[in-house]
Every structure is written in C-alpha cells, then in structure tokens.
Amino acid sequence: MSSIRHIVRAEKFGWLLLLAGLLAACSHTAPQRPSQRMGETPKGDSTQLALMEMNQQLALAADKQLTRLAQEQTEPYALYVSNTWIHILDRGDEDSFSPIPGEEWTVHMRIYDLEEHLLEDSEAAYHIGKQELPLAVEANIEEWYHGTRARMLVPWYAAFGMKGTDRIPPYENVIIEIEIR
C-alpha cells in the first residue's frame, strides 16, 4: 500500500515539475539585439526556429503542388528563378528593350488562386527593382520585353508571402497572368 502512495506522490511531483517548467518557459525575457544576420538560423529562439521549420515545410509542399500542377497543364511550362513555373504566351517585341532596374513600366496582372478564382486584377506603373511587384515577377521581368505576356504558377513565398494582402490570403500559391505594357 505504501508503494502505491509513493507512486501517486511521484506522479503529483512529476506534474508539478512539468507545470513549473512550462511556467518558466513562458516567462518574459528582456529585449535583446538580434544575434543573427538575415538568412542565418536564429540561435536560442525556439519560436523563430519553429516558424522557420514550418515555413520550410510549407515551401516544400508549395513546390510539390505547383510542380504537379505545371505537369498537368496542356501548355509547356518551364521552371524559372524562385521556383516559379512560367508559360510564355507572347514574347513581345524582342527588338525593344527589356526592363532594367529603376525604370518605370506599366504591368497588368491578374492574380488567381489555384482553383482559378480571380483574386486581383490590376494595372499600374511599377519601378523595376524597387520590390513593388511580387518577387517572382521581379526576378524574371528583366528577361522580358514590351508586350510580353506570361502565365506564372507562383509559390506563396515568391508571391505575397506570410502576410498576403487585402485580397490575397497569407501563404497563398497563386497563378499570375502578366502583361508588360
């Protein structure tokens, strides 16, 4: 009978230790200067590490999903910079100039989710290289010309990221139909 009491006490003590550990882990630490540089793994911050791991898993899943979608298309898609699958609909005026950083070009974008629901339709003047366009567009636009039309299958991390926009949800893989005017 006394051994049962010891087990019950040990269980209660174990729960108390677990509770104390959880409370200690939740305590607020004083703000510190970041100790890592951009792109380096954070040291000691379990929340940041967990977020990085989750984002890496979501990025791999996005890449697999878009690869499968590109392979299912009847038109040929090629894998470009930033793991974006692109089908060039019209090469545009190849005798004209390509956009260069700093220039202002008019870009028409239609952005769809992967089920082809229109999320956004916009045409605006953008400064090339100023991060006004999604990363996948910025990474590839300097290879195109006035009049180029393309259809892009873009992973969330090269589109609108973890935050999304007013009309595009966070972590959303998208289809971007683009025309450079």
Image: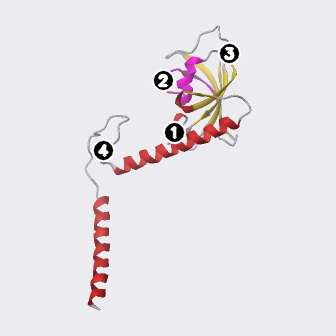
Q: Which mark is residue 161?
A: 1
Residue tagged 3 = 92
**Marks 4/1: CA–CA distance:** 23 Å
Q: Amino acid at mark 3?
A: Gly
Please identify the quarter of the rendering in which residue 146 is found.
top right
Residue range (magenta):
122-143
Disc 4 vs disc 1: which is toward the camera?
4
Disc on the earlier residue, 2 or 1: 2
> Disc 2 versus disc 1: distance between alpha carbons?
17 Å
* Disc 4 and disc 1 in contact, CB within 8 angstroms: no
- Among numbered discs 2 and 3, the one appearing first in the sequence: 3
Q: Residue, x 74% and y 32% (percent of image)?
A: 74
Whichever of callouts 4 and 3 sits on the residue coming sooner in the sequence is 4
Q: Amino acid at mark 2?
A: Lys
For label 4, the SS is: loop
Kindly state the secondary structure of the residue where label 3 is placed.
loop
Residue 118 as seen in the image, left or right of residue 102: right
Packing grade of label 3 (10 A; few <14, some 14-19, many >=20) is: some
- The answer to whether residue 170 shows anywhere in this view is no
Decide whether residue 168 is among the magenta residues: no
The quarter of the picture where the N terminus appears is bottom left
* Upstream in sequence: badge 2 or badge 4: 4
- Residue type of the residue flagged with mark 4: Lys
Taking the image as shown, residue 91 lies to the left or right of residue 58, namely right
* Mark 2 neighbour class, 10 Å CA radius: few under 14, some 14 to 19, many 20 or more: few
Q: Which residue corresponds to mark 4?
A: 43
Question: Residue 105 appears in which quarter of the rendering?
Answer: top right
